[in-house]
Image (tube, grey):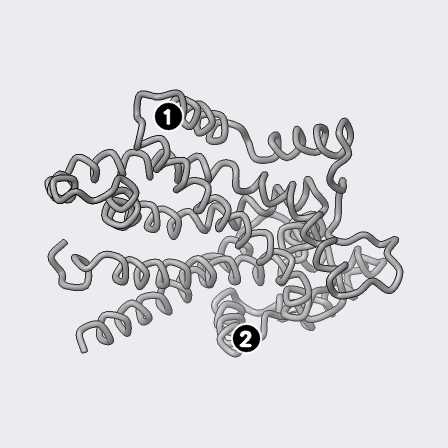
Amino acid sequence: MNLLRSILIRIAYAVALLIAVIVLNFTMMYLAPGDVADTIAQASGGADPEVMEAIRREYGLDQPFIIQLGTYVGKVLQLDLGYSFFYNQPVMQLMLDRLPATLLLVLTAQIVALIVGVLLGVISARNPNGISSHFVTLFALFGYSAPVFWTGILLLIAFSLLVPLFPVAGMRDVTLEDPSFFTQVVDVLHHLVLPAFTLASIFLALYSRLCRAAMLEVLGSDYIRTAKAKGLSDRQIVYKHGLKNALSPVVTLAGLQFSAVVSGAVLVETVFSWPGLGTLALQAIIARDTPVILGILFFSALVVIMVNLITDLVLRTIDPRIRTGSA
């Protein structure tokens, strides 16, 4: 019952936070320099004063700010994100068309970063003064300090031009004629390797360093010494008893960093011409397509809030101290 009450309270907080984000995003776009009506008029081929006035009436831009804000919030709560004047179609449909590509990239990068980062952290912690530990430290330093777009450009040069193992851009090979489902899956995965590794690189560095520090602390605990005294194997001690307790800070950081993964996808998708929400966001910013920009900001906030809720539930599952309130 306490768990259900806790979940309901967190959902209420999440809804309130999401509404606050919607209001903040709309306010920032409203206060941004420039006239949206002028941008729309130029896109339609004219900026006559009468045309401008008609556009303002059609899009509700002649209304006071509070009226525009209330109308927008009401529509968003009904899952109506508006209409794109640049793409000439509903924003929701635009985002749904691009969403699978972004989710594939973001989730793949996050999973790869978590799995590889945790494994590197464990290997490093088992031999903290060995070559493997120094390698992980050097790799983490490089991954964390290198800008993600720079890493992407280097990988493009190395594995698309010098050693042509992976495609240069896009998500699919347009030259394939009537491919089978298996061929399409392999083709998408082939295109996914470079952008996913690029996006995962910086977070892999974070997770490996954090897991290493957490494992070193756990392996020095009393219950680990007791497990060794009982004659348990090193593998059982590390992976069954140590890793489970060391995962809590890594999972927490992964939830907090998910927003950075989503924002990093904008740069990665631009570098690799990946047809996702990041590329759509860049094109919308250049075209000053306000409904699309607001829609992507809303979706990003929604994803981050949901991931934080899921992270909290996962922590309660892997750490009994959180469930009982003893930590």
Name the residue at 46% across, 39% down.
204
Q: Quadrant of the N terminus?
A: bottom left
Q: Which residue is mark 2?
A: 79
Secondary structure of the residue carrying tag 1 is: helix
Q: Is residue 280 left or right of residue 238?
A: right
Q: Position of residue 219 (x, y in %)?
A: 21, 37
Q: In front: 200, or 229?
A: 229
Q: Is residue 51 left or right of residue 103?
A: right
Characterize the local packing of mark 2: few (<14), some (14-19) or many (20 or more) Cα atoms within 10 angstroms.
few
Characterize the local packing of mark 1: few (<14), some (14-19) or many (20 or more) Cα atoms within 10 angstroms.
many
Name the residue at 70% across, 48% down.
190
Q: Position of residue 94 (x, y in %)?
A: 68, 65
Q: Which mark is residue 133?
A: 1
In the rendered view, tell whether residue 158 sits above or below residue 208: above
Name the residue at 30% across, 42% down.
235
Q: Amino acid at mark 2?
A: Leu
Q: Amino acid at mark 1?
A: Ser
User: Where is residue 193, by image quadrant?
Assistant: top right
How far apart, in angstroms, are the residues tagged by discs 2 and 1? 49 Å
